[in-house]
Amino acid sequence: MKLVMAIIKPFKLDEVREALTPLGVQGLTVTEVKGFGRQKGQTEIYRGAEYHVSFLPKLKIEVVVPDDMVDAVVEAVANTARTGKIGDGKVFVLDVERALRIRTGETDSSAL
């Protein structure tokens, strides 16, 4: 099993979710996060005063999938979240040693 973690622009969430559903992804976790990369933040104007925003709002999507689905999930996220502009985000893939569904006690791939 693998954990696919993606940092994306907030307005791309619905498109990414719709791209993952046909692949068999049954659930995912979404967290509002802030950060910066090559963008280095941005300058905004509020009530006539200019100020620098260092951390930009992003969404972190986490989904655990079987090993044979990883490439399809990564490709779907990357293709759907891409705008072609700086700040589109990143996708990370990590190993998952164990999973447990608390309600039923199912473990590993049956717990997904």
Image (tube, rainbow, N blue to C red):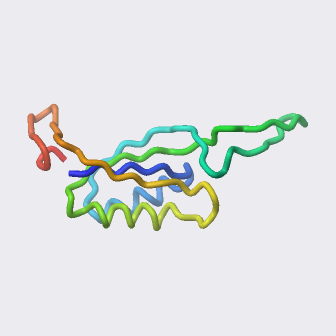
Residue 81 at x, y = what percent?
Answer: 50, 60
Q: Compared with residue 6, is residue 100 higher up or lower down, i.e. above or below?
A: above
Q: Compared with residue 106, is residue 25 higher up or lower down, i.e. above or below?
A: below
Please name whichever residue, 12 or 37, is drawn nearer the observer in this view of the structure: 37
Please tell me how many numbered marks the rendered image carries. 0
| Residue lying at 38% horizontally and 66% vertically, measured from the top left | 75
* Quarter where residue 102 is shown: top left
* Horizontal side, residue 32 vs residue 28: left or right: right
* Horizontal side, residue 83 vs residue 6: left or right: right
Furthest residue toward top = 102
| Residue lying at 21% horizontally and 58% vertically, measured from the top left | 67
Residue 65 at x, y = what percent?
Answer: 24, 53
Q: Compared with residue 102, is residue 75 higher up or lower down, i.e. above or below?
A: below
| Residue lying at 55% horizontally and 45% vertically, measured from the top left | 58
Residue 95 at x, y = what percent?
Answer: 25, 48
* Quarter where residue 85 is shown: bottom right
| Residue lying at 11% horizontally and 48% vertically, measured from the top left | 110
Furthest residue toward right = 48
Q: Compared with residue 78, is residue 8 higher up or lower down, i.e. above or below?
A: above
Residue 27 at x, y = what percent?
Answer: 30, 48
* Horizontal side, residue 6 vs residue 94: left or right: right
